[in-house]
Amino acid sequence: MSDENNNLQNETQINENDYNEQEKIRREKLAELIENGNNPYFITKYEVDSDTKQIIENFEESEGKDVKIAGRLMSRRNMGKANFINIADFHGIIQAYVRLDDVSEEKYMQFKKWDIGDIIGINGKVFKTKTGEVSIHAYGIDLLSKSLVPLPEKFHGLKDAEIKFRQRYLDLIMNREVKDMFVKKQLFWETVRNFMSEKGFLEVETPVLEVNSGGAAATPFKTHHNALDIDVFLRISMGELWQKKLLVAGFEKTFEIGRQFRNEGMSNEHLQDYTQMEFYWAYADCRDGMELVKELYRKITKAVTGGSKFISHGFEIDMDKEWVLYDFEDIIKSRLDIGIYDANIKQLKSKLDELHVAYDPKLNYWRLVDVLWKVVRKDLSGPGFLVGQPVQLNPLPKRLEKDPRKADQMQVIIAGSEMGNGYSELNDPLDLEKRFREQRIMGEAGDTEAHNHDQDFIDALNYGMPPAFGFGVSERLFSFIMDRPMRECVLFPLMKPKE
């Protein structure tokens, strides 16, 4: 679209106070159409054979050809017996030239009454204007759907986040970059799915409703199953314990992409329901997993950004550079002068107070250590892997043979945040049962993120599960690549009902 058209004033740009009057006028126009036998809502089909992107990007092949497109009328410039209009479809915006002499007088007089926001169809020949803009010279025009409410004013748009999220369709109409972002999000998950399939992983589906909320340290949503008369939980992981049961069953490579739910606080990095991918890989360990994850993340970044670099949360990230290895114990010691295996709970709280970090005073020792780690993490650029986490923070990984206090676990660190979590899976049912007992004690002491005891899973492990690596990544990674809050990267985020 030319700079000239970019600066055109939308003829229906109005103040919010005028909306009711404008709506009345539009309804009167609709009534007139219906009275004259031209009800646009009776139209059930329109034979589209092109789109804006195809026409513009392939102009040399398109020039002079007949095309038929449909989309939303976004602006118009009235020149008496001719109009230049802009039409937006899913792929972009294109200009059309509509002249009285090229369409019937009756149709042109109807067209003059169409409003910005109406859905229209255009058929005509592709040409380029004197200013070099690819356009369509129309010889056929149709009103396909009437817009009864004016669009937001073009040059100010939707500024209120509440309105943007509640009426996301308006945000998508008015902001092409927002629509493009969700196209990139589809590329994000398509890349993940294709990568895992190409690596020989089988995509599976596991239950969303669970009797035990296992596989992660998180607070679940609880509901009631009427038919079985039992309480159940929405899953907090992407089938972690179920996929491990598949390892027991002889499946060696599985993955799942789906929604999971955590009844916790909202922030720029956290939502209560979001999309996650988890994979499980028999006979592999953390070192194998790191290499696979690096390759996956580099492919994702290239698919979404076209290259290896992006800026996120003030950090310049290059996924192709050498990834850093961060040791949990060492980095807390070097940054905060706290030895996590030597300190006591009073010292941890004192350090957090010194740093002016808010925390729940009822947290146990290891949860306070985790709060300290999150203080350190926010300054780490990455890309890198965190290793050497204490076993107490997650009962499901294997212990490091050289230091049993630590889990054979890794987390991806990018732009000061965790962007994925994986570990060599614990397949010792006796050790796991002991850890579940420890988690139960933590839960009874008030730790809402403690893992539930899952006897069914232990029963499965008793039959033997091969050594394996498991990993999970959520759509938080996409939001960081976009450098936007996670909520903005969801098409329709959960909203409180209007009062």
Image (spheres, rainbow, N blue to C red):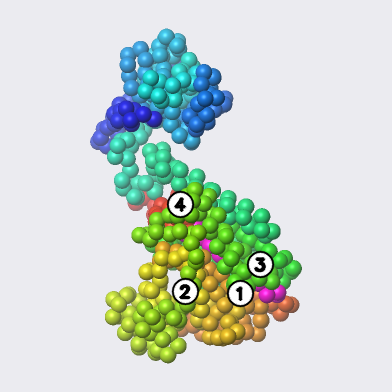
Q: Which numbered disc, 2 or 4, marks the residue that appears first in the sequence? A: 2
Label 3 close to label 1 by CB (< 8 Å)? no
Q: Which numbered disc, 4 or 1, marks the residue that appears first in the sequence? A: 1
Q: Is residue 357 above or below residue 44?
A: below
Secondary structure type for disc 3: strand
Q: Which numbered disc, 1 or 2, marks the residue that appears first in the sequence? A: 2
Estimate the x, y position of residue 105 in percent, counting from the top left: 42, 9
User: Three-letter amino acid code at disc 1?
Assistant: Ser
- Residue at 41% in and 76% down: 373
- Residue at 30% in and 37% down: 155
Relative to the observer, which residue lies in front, 250 or 150? Answer: 250
Q: Residues within 10 Å of mark 2 (few under 14, many from 20)?
A: many
Q: Which mark is residue 424?
A: 1
Q: Is residue 331 magenta?
A: no
On the picture, is 423 further left or further right than 368? right
Q: Which mark is residue 326?
A: 2
Q: Is residue 23 visible?
A: no
On the picture, is 459 further left or further right than 136? right
